[in-house]
Image (cartoon, rainbow, N blue to C red):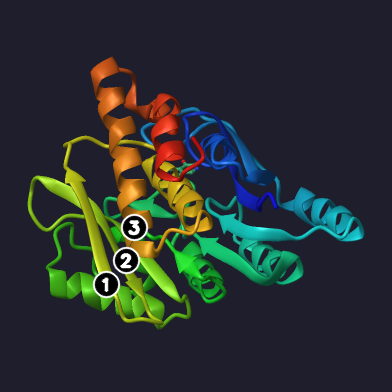
Amino acid sequence: MQKRALAIHDISCIGRCSLTVCLPILSAVGIETVVLPTAVLSTQTGGMTGFTFHDLTSEMTPITDHWKALGQTFDVIYSGYLGSLAQAKLVEDIICDFKREHSLVVVDPVMADNGEYYSLMTPEFTDEMRSLCKNADIITPNLTEAAFLLDRPYYPHPSEKEIEELLRGLAALGAKKVVITGVSFEGNSLGAAAYDSETGEISYAFTDRVNAIFHGTGDVFGSSLVASVMSGKKLSEAIRIAMDFTFRAIKRTLAAGTDLRFGVQFELELPYLMRELGVL
Ligand code: PXL
């Protein structure tokens, strides 16, 4: 039977992040993707000025009330960038209302990167995201979000021991599996670290590091991770596929020389992901 996802993220009209990344990636691997937009922005916010922002909090309950009346459920619920503090509690309720017994819940506590909150995010989001992470099977913070969630200082180059402390600390918040992105031990490699609290397994996946800020890559990684896990890949394999897919899109973008604020060229790498996941 076809799998069905609920993606709860913003629509950044331009900028290849959130829903404009999640929807094509999950669809490409054969997952029906239902969307619940948290906000509409003219562009993503990183490196941008003058963007518009329209919060959709007041639409969310009427939308989900209608879905309840239609008896809808989802095999995976994947949340990311929220448009207001109040949405964290709404997402917790949505998870309770729409998951089935074996559904996967993935929470990306999108708030910050490179040691700083994104422009519309404030420290108050940290408490809300921490509480949302309790309900998740998998959480996917970057290194900055991991530090903020645990109320620790952010170090761009932590040791392996520090990464493992972060992984275990985050699992203690309640999530079964933790994936930290933006991990770099050596200067020239960048990757993801994963911890499965049920098996105790820790795994890593690295690619070459490119010294630039690539907007939306957390969502390209997260969406391809969700696609991989939903296709039956174990976590260690899923982070490898998601890292490779994201890095391929980064290389394509660098070769094309396009404005990095408009996201990475993942579109023509979709066949790679589809082949890895056995749908092509
Ligand atoms: O990819 C994270 C993200 C999502 N949505 C919006 C953003 C960002 C990162 O800056 O600005 C609107």
- The quarter holding residue 171 reads bottom left
In front: 247, or 12? 247
N-terminal label among 1 and 3 = 1
Residue that numbered label 2 is attached to = 194
In front: 90, or 242? 242
How many angstroms separate mark 2 from mark 1 (CA)? 6 Å
* Above or below: residue 140 compared with residue 25: below
Q: Is residue 162 visible?
A: yes
Q: Position of residue 157 (x, y in %)?
A: 14, 59
N-terminal label among 3 and 2 = 2
Q: Position of residue 243 (x, y in %)?
A: 31, 47
N-terminal label among 2 and 1 = 2
Residue that numbered label 3 is attached to = 237
Contact (CB < 8 A) between labels 2 and 1?
Answer: yes
- Tell which tag, 1 or 3, sits nearer the viewer: 3
Judge from the rendering whether residue 221 lies leftward or rightward of residue 31; answer left or right: left
